[in-house]
Amino acid sequence: MYEVVGYLSAIIVAVSYFTTDKVFVVLQTVSNVLISLSFLMQGLYLSTLGTAIATIRTITLGLSRDKRVLKISIFCILHALVSLIGYDTMYDLIYLVGLEMFTLAFLVRDTHTFRCTLIVPNLLYIVYKLCVGSIGSMIGTLIETIAIFIYIFRRKYERVRTIQIIR
């Protein structure tokens, strides 16, 4: 059942990259809730808690632009504390680094650049999810990463096309 939840989260998150900023935050939040549920069903409690914090982070930082550095610092500290308390295997460090990188990506204000900075944390999540056997969620993150690349190339194509039309 947790695999089905992972696949559903994949569809939602892939769609999020082709939406406006506010819809992006909502879809990412729904996807995070599903991923937390998937981890919980597998008994991966550190990942469940880390993703729950990431969900709150996405809502807080995605919808509000004020006191950004302070909020990012708080979420980085929360992720580190959860990881120190719930540390079980070396794989947990991969997950923590991904969470921290994703959180630090919120320092970027430009939507396009922000979405590009999510590639590396997603690759770390793929490795982590593969190592812990969360295949559905791993495929979901792989689909999300592919969606980011499609978004980047589509955006680049649109810019080139606009330049050609102007000439």
Image: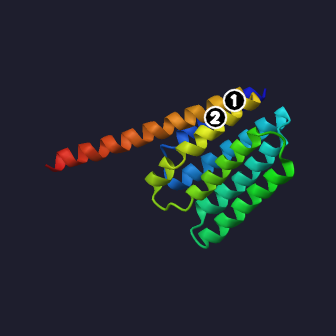
Q: Which residue has dot 2 on it? A: 126
Residue type, numbered disc 1:
Leu
Query: Based on the displayed image, in which of its 4 quarters is residue 140 positioned?
Result: top right
Task: Between residue 113 and residue 15, name the one nearer to us.
Answer: 113
Residue 74 percent coordinates (x, y): 71, 66
Disc 1 crowd, CA 10 A, few/some/many (<14, 14-19, 20+) = some
Q: Horizontal placement of 153 versus 53: left or right?
A: left
In the picture, the disc for residue 130 is 1
- What residue sits 60% from the left and 45% below the top? 121
SS at mark 1 in the image? helix
Residue 141 percent coordinates (x, y): 61, 35
**Residue farthest to the bottom?**
67
Residue type, numbered disc 2:
Ile
**Residue farthest to the front?**
90
Disc 2 crowd, CA 10 A, few/some/many (<14, 14-19, 20+) = many
- What residue sits 55% from the left and 47% below the top? 118
Task: Between residue 112 and residue 100, name the one nearer to us.
Answer: 100
Task: Between residue 74 and residue 26, name the one nearer to us.
Answer: 74
- What residue sits 56% from the left and 32% below the top? 143
Query: Based on the displayed image, in which of its 4 quarters is residue 128 positioned?
Result: top right
- Colour setting: rainbow
SS at mark 2 in the image? helix
Residue 129 percent coordinates (x, y): 70, 33
Q: Considering the image in quadrants, where does the N terminus appear?
A: top right
Residue 166 percent coordinates (x, y): 17, 50
**Residue farthest to the left?**
167
Q: Using the numbered discs, state the Cα–Cα distance from disc 2 to disc 1 in whole angstroms.
A: 6 Å
- What residue sits 47% from the left and 43% below the top? 18
Are the residues at dot 2 and dot 1 in contact (C-beta closer than 8 Å)?
yes
